[in-house]
Image: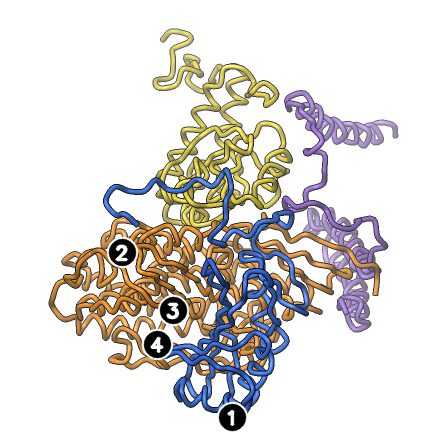
Amino acid sequence: MLPDYLYIIFFFLLGIAFVGSAFIVSWVLRPRAPNSAKNSPYECGEIIKGDSRIQFNVRYYLYALIFVIFDVEILFTMPWAVVFRQLGKVAYFEMAAFVLVLVAGLYYAWKKGALEWQ
Amino acid sequence: MGELLTVNMGPQHPSTHGVLYLELTIDGEIVVNCKPHLGYLHRSMEKIAENRTYIQFIPFTDRLDYLASMNNNLGFCLTVEKLLNIPVTPRAQYLRVIIAELNRVASHLVAIGTFAQDLGAYATALFYTFSDREKIVELFDNICGSRLTYNYMRIGGVSGDIPAGTEQIIKDFIAYERKQLKEYNELLTYNVIFLARSKKIGILSKEKALNYGVSGPILRASGVKWDIRKEEPYLVYDKFDFDVPTGGVGDSWDRYKIKLDEIEQSLRIIEQAIGAIPEGNPVSKVNRVFRGTGETYMRTENPRGELGFYLVAEGGFNPYRCKIRSPSFSNLSVLSELIKGLNISDAVCVLGSLDIVMGEIDR
Amino acid sequence: MQNSDLALQIKNKFPSIVLDEQPNFLVVPKTALLDVACFLKSELGFETCHCLTAVDRKDKMEVVYHLYSFSNHFMLTLKVIISLDDLTVESVSSLWRSADWLEREVFDLFGIRFLNHPDLRRIMNPDNWTDHPLRKDFKREDFIPRPVTLGLKG
Amino acid sequence: MAINEKIPGDRFMEKFPGGEIILTKSEDLLKWAKGSSLWPLTFGLSCCAIEMMATGASRFDIDRIGSGVFRGSPRQCDVMIVAGTICVKMGDCLKKLYEQMPEPKYVIAMGNCAIGGGIFYHDTYSVVKGTEQLGVPVDVFVAGCPPRPENLLHGIMKLQEKIKHAKQRPSTTDQK
């Protein structure tokens, strides 16, 4: 039973090492010369007018929400898509049902006007 | 109505067509107010004009609207000829018409390419139109030795005759360009996404256009049938028949479509002019030292609108005062009215359709 | 439609003002500018203020208006003479919106103040500048004049 | 075949007998990578910007030398091509943008106006006479008004050479 978990742990560590090495190598190689102008925010070369810490419009949150739903959907279809030939007909219809439920959700959001900006 | 945020669509920005600084106050994605700031390319042209002789100022007019340098040269030389009433040889008039119209085609091609790029067709349309423009720019390179700032027109004519095989090159280019125009129509003009992004965006009514002094393709897109080459013909424009395409509603798509149709009309003019070039020397034999008194105002049809020169001369070699009335300056003043209430991506679309050049606005 | 009959119509509409009529431009006194401009726009059909500029004549300033009427294809040049000690004139941006930016540019480069202009600030030069570059008496130390060429004595 | 037979034309790499493996210093590898992927900042000011776009377009194709990716924000750029006339108002914006670029950064002054004021040197009150006057160190000057696209490509190649043959690591603190 244990070796199965070993694989997962091994892949988890490999992921962390892969991402970490990218950071470490670039941290080592890049020159560092911070100065005040470089740390100031980039505003097309002009002085910053007004403050950027404001209450954002709720529309942005709705967009983010719908994006997350479909992102998770792809997360599930990916492993299925790798082996869907061996799984046969049943898995196919199962996945189709899963996708249809989400499309219905999108249709509802569309008709409700969540995607319109106004 | 959330809190308002002030965003600098500043001097260094990929879609402001030069160094234009728009201070946008936005509510989420909607532009509530836009305050343009100019002057980031103000090179004090009019002060220079007062310290240069008439001939010495011609290279500076190249750098005004640097996409249509020939038309600027033409506008300035016509004004000086009108002020000092200098004759122009007939061959020079035909050469000037051909080359000014070729430069109009090149300028509209850049405007179409950058407009499509603003709407998200990243660089594909730009590559098409720029490769067409390269043919014209190479032709100008043969004629007067430079790709962008030509300094080709002289007071009283043109600086040199066109090399021998140029008529044939121009004829081939016209045939090639007509094929390309059909391709642009299929590829871009009636593309569903392109229509969705530019139809009904930034509608400019006729009265507002006249009130803001807008001129050129943008005025014609709003339905005013007005072209200086037809209304007050200069050079030999009255000898050619070409029609003035006018748009319907005055939205961004109309402004784009007008430029395509105008390329077609310019090709027609060039075709008729090529066939009827008279013989003769390209510049009139006049005493090359120009001085005079008086004042005059002359305007010509630039690709972007009516370029006017107001020259005041007090007898010296240099003009006493030279005011350059630039079309993009008035065209841009409409922008802040057009984009109130649109979201930012549509504001970029309207700015692209107005087709401004900062060198001409800031002088 | 020529300068002369335009001047005639203005004279019988405003008998009081002194209208100086030149071959190709009209000079209007500063005080009567706004009503003449209104009259030109409403009755005589001058839809656009095509170009607005100023000329520094060393002893006086001239503000030059080029008004164009699309209906009868005529470009009128209107001039207003301003003395150097009181550089102000009425703003016509309420009549023609195109004059708004053009007046801001004249203010920036010449220093002529346009009364009740909606937003009169510099358009071309940085806002902290105090001098006006296009005046004939404009002096600055970093202003490098071009050396006079031997051939042409200006 | 000698073990470290030099590859003709480039003194960095030595070839192993089999020919598949190349031996080089990590420093040179880093410089080669930096040189061949110079991302320019879209900083077109006036007429030279049109020639820069023509260089980016399909005929002169700046992608051949690896710097076709024109980035909008200075945070993702390596080279700032100052293409056009620098005016007084634009001067401090240029200085700030140069400061905001991350460290291995280079500047190409394209066109006479960016080099030394060019045609706008005399009788102007609002033109900065060259990039150097703003205190921005310039690596390559590309002359011309506007320089032809081939000139700009040549300028970028000269910059690549400069990067490859740089003696020590160019940190801007001691670059003056």
The residue that label 1 is drawn on is C12
The residue that label 4 is drawn on is B229
* Chain of the residue on which disc 4 is drawn: B
| Marks 2/1: CA–CA distance | 50 Å
The residue that label 3 is drawn on is B181
Could you say whether the residue bearing mark 2 is in a helix, strand or loop? loop
The answer to which of marks 2 and 3 sits earlier in the sequence is 2
Residues tagged 3 and 1 counted as in contact (Cβ below 8 A): no
* Chain of the residue on which disc 1 is drawn: C
Q: Chain A is drawn in which colour?
A: purple
Quadrant of res C90: bottom right
What numbered label is drawn on residue A95?
none
Of residue C34 and residue B159, the one placed in the foreground of this image is C34
**Is disc 3 surrounded by few (<14), some (14 to 19) or many (20+) residues within 10 Å?**
some
Residues tagged 3 and 4 counted as in contact (Cβ below 8 A): no
Write down which chain is painted yellow.
D
Q: Can residue D81 be seen in this view?
A: no
The answer to which of marks 4 and 2 sits earlier in the sequence is 2
| Marks 3/4: CA–CA distance | 23 Å
Tell me which amino acid carries mark 1. Answer: Asn
Tell me which amino acid carries mark 2. Answer: Tyr
A56 sits to left or right of D106: right
